Amino acid sequence: MGHLTPFFRLAALLAGNNIKVTFITPSPTVSLAESQTLFRFFASFPEINQKQFHLLPLDKHPSNSEDPFYYHMERICQSSHLLSSLLSSLSPPLSALITDMSLASPAISITQALNLPNYVFFTSSAKMSTLFMSFHALIDSEATTDLDEIEAIKIPGLEAIPRSWIPPPLLQNTNNLLKTYFLENGKKMAESSGILVNTFESIEHEPLRKLNEGKVIEGLPPVIAIGPLAPCEFEKIQPLPWLDEQPAGSVVYVSFGSRTAMSREQLKELGEGLAISGHRFLWMVKDKKVDREDEEDLGQVIGSGLMEKLKEKGLVVKYWLNQEAILSHPAVGGFLSHCGWNSITEAIWNGVRILAWPQHGDQKINADIAEKIGLGTWEKSWGWGEETAVNGTDIAEKIKEMMGNELLRHQAMHIREEARTAVEIGGSSRMGPMELIETWKK
Ligand code: BUP
């Protein structure tokens, strides 16, 4: 969902500016959330043409330890040769193809053969894109033989990224799906016609500047800030009767995104923490990585005793509710978040402060941005959610600190104004996409 959601928003922006959009969706999907949201998206935008891309089965069967979403990306890549005939068959003929970063390498090769411009949409932060696009150079450099020895990754022109913030699979000496995906796609990005990023100048000025000056890696095409992309209307539709009854700014929203299933022990500690904090809360519980496998009810997942206790102050729900409807609700005053990049840009869009608890992937790099721009606080000693156990009392303490921090609340509202200015006419995230749109219309 972290890749699909910003693509919906980009497609809606293009369609709203009289571009004829064809949206290619891989089939089958991994999660129910994808299928259901795709259905709502196409129902809301009948002018957008849907083309299904039927995936081939994978050569080798996924092992239980691998992330099913990485396997899906691999399956898309292995089927990508079939895209060529699909793209050529479209009528009217395409002006450009925009692909996700996970498909950069095969998609760029295909569009080169078809003599078609290719743009890559990077759905995380610009800071993360600097790592994505320069990682292959670090691995290729003769100085780096043993990844266990790396203490920090120095990206030219930018502050070094500490080892502990790098997604752990990237620093394994052996290959794995994430590392291969980074190396192959990151390197190929230089051959695209342009790189679109869902960010904006005032929060990521430095990485954007260094990328465009050729400091991070030489020979990149323009890196264009296009964010924060505005949520679509269908994302705002969500009845929230409990939230409607809560006082303004009083509720902590708790969610760790579409791909993080916490351990049962950690869920219980989190539940205790919410109860101890004394604050009202809306907690989105996700028990399994893939929602189709999530069969047990909340009482079984976190225990019926704890569920009873939590009812006093909060609402505990099972994944999924439209997050945009929650974050834009006046009752929500804080967000305990894993710091997926969409969650951060959505918190910014709605002026909601964050307590960061990164779980894996790009989330520590994103949490650092949230902290530096004054949107949130990050308790670094909590480590990766997947590895460390944090007790309820500590969680409660940090929630109280965040909800009591008036400066953060003001700063979040200020960043919200900057974000909205960036995408208005004349704004820094408006000019890039508008120029592209004009090019594609010719
Ligand atoms: Br959970 C959940 N409702 O219940 P991120 C998520 N979302 O609308 P992730 C809902 O999914 P990656 C829910 O608003 C955001 O647009 C949410 O993206 C939406 O994190 C998206 O925040 C989740 O980037 O993806 O899912 O971990 O790993 O790609 O960052």
Image (spheres, rainbow, N blue to C red):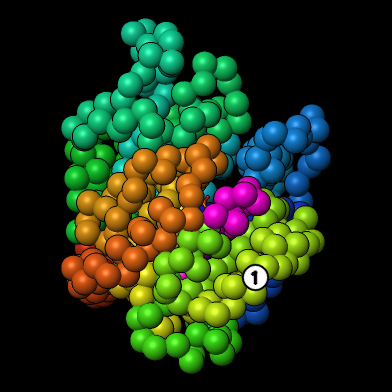
Q: Which residue is mark 1?
A: 307
Left or right: 210, with 242 as reference point: left
Left or right: 309, with 388 as reference point: right
Residue 161 placement (x, y as % from top left): 30, 33
Residue 227 vertical position relative to residue 166 in the rendered view, above or below: below
Asked if the stretch drawn in magenta spans residue 85, the answer is: no
Measuring 62% from the left and 49% from the top, which residue is drawn there? 265
Left or right: 211, with 183 as reference point: left
Residue 217 vertical position relative to residue 382 in the rendered view, above or below: above
Quarter residue 13 falls in: bottom left
Residue 284 vertical position relative to residue 157 in the rendered view, above or below: below
- Camera-side residue: 157 or 46? 157
Magenta residues, start to end? 253-269
- Camera-side residue: 313 or 236? 313
Measuring 65% from the left and 79% from the top, which residue is drawn there? 43
Asked which secondary structure carries label 1, the reply is helix
Measuring 24% from the left and 46% from the top, which residue is drawn there? 208
**In the rendered view of the protein, which quadrant contains the C terminus?**
bottom left
Crowding near the residue tagged with mark 1, few <14, some 14–19, many ≥20 C-alpha atoms within 10 Å: many
Which residue type carries mark 1? Met
Residue 234 placement (x, y as % from top left): 55, 80
Residue 370 placement (x, y as % from top left): 30, 55
